[in-house]
Image (tube, helix red, strand yellow):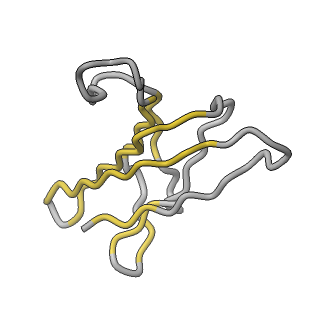
Amino acid sequence: SVMFRDDLVPKAEVRLIAIDDQAADPPSDETGIVVQTSQDGRYSIPGVAPGAYVLNARGVINNRVRRTEREITVSAGPQRTIHVDVALP
């Protein structure tokens, strides 16, 4: 889910970008998988392969764009779903 303070943020953009250990440059914001949160501020990105990623979230709150990013790791194993909450500043 994407939150701002105590509220869930609808229609926020969430982008998942793979981190390539071999790349000389950092991951570009123009790549990756992009989804939008639902009206209740939740999102789902199915079929993500194990690896390291940057998760970017962007939402418009009170006519102001708010962004954040964090690194996440998707591990191989029996757990098929992970839950990542994102708090916009």
From the viewer's perspective, is residue 45 above or below residue 87?
above
The residue at the point 50 percent across, 57 percent down is 39
Q: Quadrant of residue 84?
A: bottom right
Question: Where residue 67 sits in the image (x, y, percent)?
Answer: 24, 54
From the viewer's perspective, is residue 55 above or below residue 85?
above
Quarter of the image for the C terminus: give it: bottom left
Q: Residue furthest bottom?
A: 6
The residue at the point 57 percent across, 34 percent down is 51
Q: Residue furthest left?
A: 64
Please tell me which residue lies in front, 3 or 16.
16
From the viewer's perspective, is residue 21 above or below residue 69?
above
Q: Residue furthest right?
A: 78
Q: Is residue 48 left or right of residue 11?
A: right
The residue at the point 55 percent across, 49 percent down is 43
Q: Is residue 64 left or right of residue 2?
A: left
Question: Where residue 42 sits in the image (x, y, percent)?
Answer: 55, 56
The residue at the point 45 percent across, 36 percent down is 16
Q: How many marks?
A: 0
Question: Where residue 4 sits in the image (x, y, percent)?
Answer: 34, 71
Question: Where residue 22 sits in the image (x, y, percent)?
Answer: 38, 18
Please tell me which residue lies in front, 17 or 87.
17
Q: Quadrant of residue 46?
A: top right
Please tell me which residue lies in front, 72 or 67.
72
Q: Quadrant of residue 19?
A: top left
